[in-house]
Structure formats: C-alpha cells, structure tokens
C-alpha cells in the first residue's frame, strides 16, 4: 500500500514503522484525515436512529422534545401543572391505554408518578433538549451563511474577512425578514435549488473518488474503527459533528412535512449525496493534504474555471439558507409547543398556511434569533469555533432524545425490555463517545450553546414555576358556592345589561378575582361567563369537543363557565369567531340543560359528564356551528338542524317538552338581548409575590425574573386580541 494512498485508511500492522510515523504526524497536522469516512459512518448511524426509529415517536405528525413530552403526559400523570380534569381524558385525541398491573411499563409509570421531583426532572430534561434546539436555530444560520460566503472568497482572494462578515450579516437580515411569508412559500422558492445542490455535491464526490483515490472506500469496513481509535482518533471526533447536524432539527421540524416524505427523501437523496460528498473529499485530501481546511471548495472540478466555481458557490449559498430555514422552523414549532404547555412566556403566534396548520411564524422570536445569529457571526468571525459550538448542541439534543425514547418505547410503544436495552446501549455507546470528545471543545467555542441554553432554560423554567404557583394560589383561594348563593340572584349588586366574559385560570370553581371585583365595583353584568382558555398535552382538540359549558348556581343567577380547550398545534385567537362559537356553545347548553342532572357547582361538566347524554351522543352533536343558527336580527332560530330535532324528540319522549321549551326560549332570548347590549372582556391578572420568609432563590425567581418576563412579553389583551374599548383589567396580589 502506497503512503499517499493510505492517509485516509488506517495502516495495517505489517506496515513499516517509518510509514506509520509519517502518517501519524500528518494525522496530527490535518486533524481530519480519517474523519471524512467517520462522518459517513456517523451519518449512517443517525440515519438508522432518527429516520427509522425516532421519527416514529411523533405525536400525529408533530415532532420535537415537547411532542415526546406530550405523549408521555397522556400515558402517565407526569404533567407538573395540576389543571387536569376528568373530561380531558374523554377527548378523541387523548390516549387511554391501560397497562397490565405487573408489566414493566406499569412499574415505570408508577415510578415516574411517585414523586414531584421525578416529574420535575423529566421536565428539566425536556427543557434542556428544547433549549439546545433553540441554540441550534441560532448557530445553523450563522455557520451556514458564513461558510457559504467564505467559499466565495476562494474565488475572490482580495475579499477581506470584514467584507465576508458584512455580507453574511446582510444575508442574515434579509433571510430573517422573509420568515413572515412562511415555510411553505420559502420552501417552494428554494426547493429546486436544494435538489440541485444535493445532486451537485453527490456528483462532485463521485467524480473525486474516481479521479483521486477509490481505495478510500475501504474505510467503510468496521475493522478500521478500532484502528482509528488506536491511532488517537478519539480527540478528532468533536470536529466532525457538523456531518450529522440537521438530524436533530429534522425531528423537531416534523410538523412541516409528512414522515414518509422525510424518510423517502433522506434515504434516497440526502444520505447518498452526503455519503458521496464526504468520501469524495477524503479522496481529494489524499492527493492534496494541504487543502484540508477548504477541501469542500477546492475539490470542486474546474476550480480554475471561474464560471463553474461561481455557479457552485451560488447554489451552495442558497442551499445554506434553506438549511437554516429548517432549523428556524423547528425553533418556532418547539417554542409554540412550550408556550402551549406553560413553559414559555406569551408570544404572538401567526399561522402562515391555511393548508398546513403546523406552519407558524413567531415575530418576537424571529428577531431575537436574528440578533443572536449576527452576534455569533461577528463575534467568532470563523467557522471552526462555531462548528465546535454546533457539535456541543447537537450531541446534547441527541442524548436527551435517547433518554426520552426509552420512556416512549416503554410507555407508548410497549416494547419488550430487551429491545429497549439494545436501543439504549447502542445509542449511548456512540453518543457518549462523541459527547466526551465534544467536551474538549468547550473552551474553543463549545461554551456558546451552553450559555444560550442556560439563558433560555432559566427563562422557561422560571416561567413554568411562576405559572404553577399562580394556578395553585388561584385554586386554593377560589370562592365557595355557599358564598355565591348567599349573595342572592342579583349578587348583591346592580345587574347592568350586557355579558361579562371573565378570563381566569380555573377550570372549576369561582375565582377569587371575581369576589375582588364585586366587592370593589357597584355593578356587574346581567350575564357572567367565566372563560378558561386551556391547553392540553394533545396535538389538537376537534372543534366539536373544544368547548365545555356548565351553569354556576341557579338559573336566575345567569352565571356560566366555559372552558375552551386547545392542543399545542391549534391556534387560539380571541376574535369575533371565538366569541361567536362561545355564545353558540352557551345557547346549545341552555337547550340541552334539561337532560342534565343538577346545576350545582362541581368538577363535572354536564355536556360530558351526564351518562344519559353520553349514551345519546350520536343523536345530539356538540357541533355548535350546525346546532344553532342565526337569522340576522331576528335572533336564534330554534330546532331546524337534525341535531336539535333529535334532541327535541328525546325530550318529548321523556314528557318534558312544553314547560322546558318555554323556559329555554325565554332564557335564550334573554341571553341574546344581553349579547346585543354589549360584551366586556374582564381579564383576571393574578400577581404572585414571594413571602418575606421565602428563600433567596425563590425571591429572585418570582419577584424579579418572573415579574420581568410578564412585563417585557406580550400582555393577555394582545394575545387574546381584545379591543381596549371593551376590556377591563382586574388585578390582585397573592403571596406564595
């Protein structure tokens, strides 16, 4: 074997000491002679893990660490916010698996649910993975654009490094400014370029293998892994993590693409193209060992012919932009899921596609990412340190995914424990090896994702902690039904015409903020509806199951509670459509109320809790769009839809038609007149403060960080799209 041909291939034991020494010196000098083949092998490992295993852990097409967490919350009671309600488990999108009492899955479930510490540790694990994905969304555009623009410098040696940074910053500003158009439009704009780029790098790699050294293909033999590590290759593993970046974002970005499409594109196009590209660069390095740093651009055939190189560089630059788009979309999706599950401050979420509900745009996060991308690009000024930072983020996300997949295989898939052990051992052997190598790069740029993740972790965990404390204090301070009944039908105040929608966090009981309101104001609206907008750990809530309505107190009080339930894929907007559906739900409830038992305040919602209604659920639909229709200013037109006709026949058979219908129509007309008189949105603002005797860390978290986040992020009135002229903010301070 010739020395020039043996650089990318580990030497045999029979080779001379002189050859081994020269190859060792060159290995130390290049730091990457064997890593091109290692990159291909590593890409193969994560193709098997992510594309064929992890992608199966999606929540009805939703991916990412929070999608996994949502699946776990539906199979075990590990949700740390205690707002679960029995009716939530009756959703058609909610899992209701029953474990065998003595199964390993049941034991794992009981172990997780045993203490609050384990639930919090699981949440922290999910948050760490989420924060690393956010860091990935910052580093990917920075390194992709900087690398692509740096390639142009190869053809223009006169271009200074400062010019490269300025051009990169301009491209980043323009790229983030396009995000409001949505992934759908940006994807269609650049999809042909990405396809051409994959075909180009695959073709260049095949050409380089044929032209320079086809013997590099021998490096795919598993026997060379041992020899590579024996030669000290472990320390270079941290420098090749860029070869698998994107696989972690691929799962988080799954909401934008079907699983089958991702699997087909990755196995038939992406993976073969990368494999040929990495192997071709290794073949090129065997003949040109001085071009390791810029091997990708130097290996392009016809580099001396400027038009060929310019075309290749242009395609590479645009493909880098598209690669950045995937990680940014994944960041938006992950933050939307975290927001829905109470782990991120309030931000505005815009759905950019009517055809694909999962495609979203978050303006606040978009501009934060842009500023941080520019800061990273200008601060590091080169790709190597950003690459080290990138490797740290990628390996951490993969480790978190592996630990979460263990629980998914046990609780969701119910896999045999032997399969779980095999998957865990194989994954951890590879990932821990690379993680140990990445740790050596922490002081060379690897600290950046740790710092970014640490900042976002503090924000997310403190916000979640404050949300839990706020809910707990509202739950423990809620007003008893006896106190409400003691006020009488007028609630001890003047009832003014109109409907008051009081937004609060409770799904049951009367919030304390209501008693605070009526003791400080001399009047209250004729109809009061307590509204709770609630996000559940499900991907979506069907429209016919979205609203839960029940009455509070006797009928003459005209008080109702409505819980609007959403999944983390759903978009909630407090607009006219929301109000219309809410009122239609209340009207339908009044019509069907005679079928329910009792009207005292309890944790059961009659629309879902009554057994008689459940038996006739196919007869009486909760689809309020078809159950109640409006006829201009003439009010509600009763019983024209099949659902209400069936309900009316059912009531008639029970001998309750005439008297009940008259009372229902009277109340419907009363509700209609109150709605026409005006609707006022009353926003309950519970302010939590730490007690004086609280620990220092709790005071910092609640009084400063959580309070600061509430001030700087969007208010409820903006998120709910409530007009200022019909809004009333009611606040109260509680000490926790």
Image (cartoon, rainbow, N blue to C red):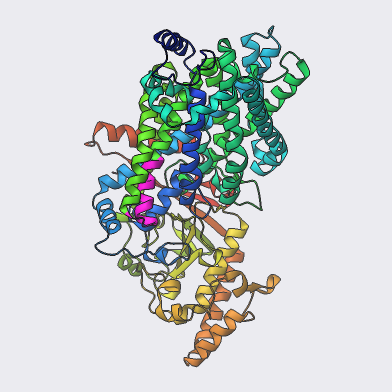
> For the view shown, which residue lies furthest in the left direction?
693
Magenta stretch: includes residue 410: yes
Magenta stretch: includes residue 15: no
Q: Report the front residue among 59 and 732.
A: 59
For residue 530, above or below residue 145:
below
User: Can residue 296 be seen by looking at this rendering?
Assistant: yes
Residue 610, horizontal then vertical, whole percent: 41, 77
Looking at the image, residue 139 sits to the left or right of residue 485; the answer is right
Residue 441, horizontal then vertical, whole percent: 41, 19
Most common secondary structure along the magenta stretch = helix
Name the image quarter holding residue 238.
Answer: top left
Residue 293, horizontal then vertical, whole percent: 56, 14
For residue 686, above or below residue 89:
above
Residue 621, horizontal then vertical, whole percent: 54, 75
**Which quadrant of the rendered structure holds the C terminus?**
top left
Q: Residue at x 58, y 51 (%)?
A: 260
Q: Residue at x 32, y 32 (%)?
A: 700
User: Can residue 248 be seen by looking at this rendering?
Assistant: no
Q: Report the front residue among 558 and 305.
A: 305
Q: How many marks?
A: 0
Looking at the image, residue 310 sits to the left or right of residue 687; the answer is right
Q: Residue at x 47, y 35 (%)?
A: 133
> For the view shown, which residue lies furthest in the right direction?
307
Q: Report the front residue among 662 and 544.
A: 544
Looking at the image, residue 464 sits to the left or right of residue 656; the answer is left
Span shown in magenta: 401-416
């Amino acid at each position: 074997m010739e020395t020039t041909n043996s650089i990318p291939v580990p030497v045999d034991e029979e080779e001379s000491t002189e050859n081994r020494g020269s190859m060792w010196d060159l290995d130390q000098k290049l730091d990457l002679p064997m890593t091109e083949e290692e990159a291909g092998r590593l890409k193969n490992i994560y193709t098997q893990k992510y594309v064929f295993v992890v992608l199966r852990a999606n929540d009805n097409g939703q991916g990412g660490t929070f999608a996994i967490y949502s699946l776990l919350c539906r199979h075990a009671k590990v949700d740390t916010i205690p707002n679960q309600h029995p009716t939530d488990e009756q959703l058609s999108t909610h899992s209701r698996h029953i474990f065998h009492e003595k199964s390993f899955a049941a034991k794992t479930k009981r172990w997780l649910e045993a203490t609050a510490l384990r639930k919090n540790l699981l949440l922290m694990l999910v948050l760490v993975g989420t924060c690393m994905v956010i860091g990935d969304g910052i580093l990917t555009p920075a390194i992709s654009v900087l690398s692509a623009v740096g390639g142009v410098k190869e053809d223009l040696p006169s271009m200074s490094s400062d010019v490269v940074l300025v051009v990169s910053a301009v491209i980043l500003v323009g790229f983030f400014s396009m995000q409001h158009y949505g992934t759908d439009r940006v994807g269609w704009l650049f999809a042909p370029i990405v396809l051409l780029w994959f075909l180009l790098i695959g073709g260049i790699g095949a050409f380089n293998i044929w032209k320079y050294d086809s013997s590099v293909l021998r490096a795919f033999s598993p026997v060379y892994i041992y020899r590579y590590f024996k030669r000290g290759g472990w320390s270079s593993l941290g420098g090749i993590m860029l070869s698998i970046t994107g696989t972690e974002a691929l799962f988080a970005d799954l909401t934008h693409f079907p699983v089958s499409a991702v699997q087909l594109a990755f196995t038939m196009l992406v993976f073969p193209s990368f494999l040929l590209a990495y192997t071709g660069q290794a073949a090129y390095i065997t003949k040109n060992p001085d071009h390791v740093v810029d091997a990708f651009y130097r290996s392009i055939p016809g580099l001396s012919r400027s038009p060929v190189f310019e075309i290749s560089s242009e395609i590479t630059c645009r493909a880098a932009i598209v690669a950045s788009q995937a990680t940014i979309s994944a960041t938006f999706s992950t933050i939307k899921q975290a927001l829905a599950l109470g782990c991120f401050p309030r931000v505005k979420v815009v759905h950019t596609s009517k055809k694909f509900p999962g495609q979203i745009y978050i303006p606040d996060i978009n501009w934060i990412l842009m500023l941080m991308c520019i800061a990273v690009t200008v601060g590091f000024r080169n790709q190597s340190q950003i690459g080290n930072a990138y490797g740290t983020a990628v390996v951490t996300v993969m480790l978190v995914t592996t630990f979460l997949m263990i629980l998914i295989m046990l609780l969701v898939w119910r896999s045999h424990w032997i399969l779980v052990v095999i998957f865990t051992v194989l994954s951890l052997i590879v990932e821990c090896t690379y993680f140990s190598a990445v740790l050596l790069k922490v002081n060379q740029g690897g600290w950046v994702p740790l710092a970014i993740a640490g900042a976002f972790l503090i924000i997310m965990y403190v916000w979640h902690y404050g949300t839990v404390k706020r809910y707990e204090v509202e739950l423990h301070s809620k007003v008893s039904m006896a106190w409400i009944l003691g006020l009488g039908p007028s609630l001890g105040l003047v009832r003014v015409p109109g409907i008051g929608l009081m937004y609060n966090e409770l799904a049951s009981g009367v919030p304390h903020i209501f008693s605070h309101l009526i003791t400080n104001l001399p009047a209250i609206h004729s109809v009061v509806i307590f509204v709770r907008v609630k996000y559940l750990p499900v991907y979506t809530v069907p429209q016919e199951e979205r609203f839960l309505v029940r009455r509070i107190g006797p009928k003459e009080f005209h008080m109702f509670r409505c819980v609007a339930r959403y999944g983390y894929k759903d978009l909630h907007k407090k607009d006219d459509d929301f109000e219309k559906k809410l009122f239609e739900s209340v009207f339908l409830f009044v019509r069907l109320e005679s079928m329910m038992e009792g009207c005292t305040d309890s944790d059961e919602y009659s629309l879902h809790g009554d057994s008689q209604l459940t038996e006739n659920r196919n007869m009486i639909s909760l689809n309020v769009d078809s159950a109640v229709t409006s006829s201009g200013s003439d009010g509600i037109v009763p019983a024209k839809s099949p659902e209400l006709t069936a309900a009316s026949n059912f009531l008639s058979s029970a001998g309750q038609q005439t008297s009940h219908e008259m009372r229902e129509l009277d109340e419907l007309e009363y509700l209609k007149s109150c709605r026409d008189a005006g609707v006022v949105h009353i926003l309950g603002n519970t302010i939590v403060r730490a007690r004086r005797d609280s620990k220092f860390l709790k005071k910092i978290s609640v009084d400063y960080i959580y309070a600061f986040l509430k001030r700087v992020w969007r208010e409820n009135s903006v998120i709910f799209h409530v007009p200022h002229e019909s809004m009333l903010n009611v606040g109260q301070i509680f000490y926790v």
